[in-house]
Image: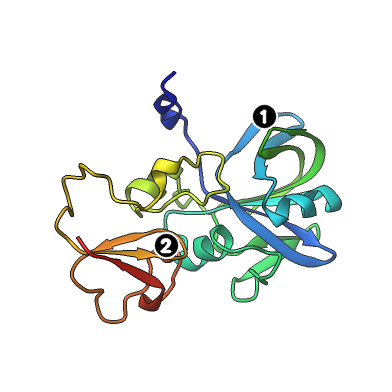
Amino acid sequence: MDLKALYNLSYGVYVTATLDKGRPVGCVTNSVMQVTASPATVAVSVNHDNFTNRCIQENGYFSVSILTTQASPAVIGTFGFSSSKHTDKFENIPYRTVQGIPVLQDCCGYIVCRVMDKMESSTHTVFLGEVVDAGGYTGDEPMTYAYYHNVIKGKSPKNAPTYVPEDSPAPAPDAPKGKNTTRWVCSICGYVYEGDKLPEGFVCPICGQPASAFVKQEP
Ligand code: FE
C-alpha cells in the first residue's frame, strides 16, 4: 500500500469554532466538505485531542471560517498551534458572532452549522452539520492545503487528519538543498528557515512567533 496516493486529495484551511460555556473556542481544520446541497450539509473532521471537539459535542453548533491565501500568520499560529483549553485564542483575533457562534473577520466566507450527527474514527470525530447560516463571501482566493504547504511552507499540526510523521521538521538525509546550511526551526509550528542567522526583526511567517522561539540546528 502506498499512502502517498492520499497526498493527491485536496483540502482547504479553515478555523472551526464554537463556544465553551459561552467562551469562544476554535481550532484549524483542513477536512471540511459539503455533503449535500439541499438541505445544505457539511462534514468536518476534528481530532479527539482538540479541546474544540468536546465543546462542539456539548454545544451542538459550530462554525467554519474559510481562510484566504492572505490569512494573517497570527490566525494560523493561534488556532493551529495552541489549545483553547488554556488560551483565549480570540483575544487578539477580530471576530463576530453569527447565530451566537464566533466567526473570524479574516476569512472569505463562513458557515454556521447545527450538529445533525457524528461518527467516531480512532482519532477523529466527523461532525455532520446542517447549515443554519452562511455568508461573508468576498471573492478572495481561499487557501488550499497545498498552498499552505508549498507556498507558505507550513507544517501540519499533529492533530491534523493529514498529519504524517515525515512532515516533521527533521532534516531529510538526502535533502539536496540546505545540506550544509544552518537551519532555524520554529519550536511552535515547525517552520524551517535556512541561513547562518535569522534576519533582524524576524517573525515566523506561519505562527508569528519571534526569533527567540527558533531552535538552531547546525549543518
Ligand atoms: Fe512558527
Among the 4 quarters of the image, the one containing residue 15: bottom right
Q: Is residue 40 left or right of residue 198?
A: right
State whether residue 83 appears in this view.
yes
Which residue matches tag 1? 35
Compared to 92, does 160 lie above or below? above
Compared to 161, does 137 lie above or below? below
Compared to 162, does 157 lie above or below? below
Mark 1 residue crowding within 10 angstroms, few (<14) / some (14–19) / many (20+) = some
Q: Residue at x 55, y 66 (%)?
A: 78
SS label for mark 1 = strand
Which residue matches tag 2? 206
Q: Position of residue 36 (x, y in %)?
A: 69, 28
| Picture quarter with ligand 1 | bottom left
Q: Position of residue 105 (x, y in %)?
A: 60, 64
* Between 18 and 130, the one nearer to me in the picture: 18
Which of marks 2 and 1 precedes in the sequence? 1
**Pointer 1 residue Cβ closer than 8 Å to ligand 1:** no
Q: Position of residue 27 (x, y in %)?
A: 62, 56
* Between 180 and 101, the one nearer to me in the picture: 180
**Pointer 2 residue Cβ closer than 8 Å to ligand 1:** yes
Q: Residue at x 58, y 39 (%)?
A: 31
Judged from this view, the residue extending furthest toward the bottom is 200
SS label for mark 2 = loop
Q: Point out the image quarter for the N terminus.
A: top left
* Between 1 and 119, the one nearer to me in the picture: 1
* Between 60 and 202, the one nearer to me in the picture: 202
Q: Amino acid at mark 2?
A: Ile
Among the 4 quarters of the image, the one containing residue 118: top right
Q: Amino acid at mark 1?
A: Val
State whether residue 60 appears in this view.
no
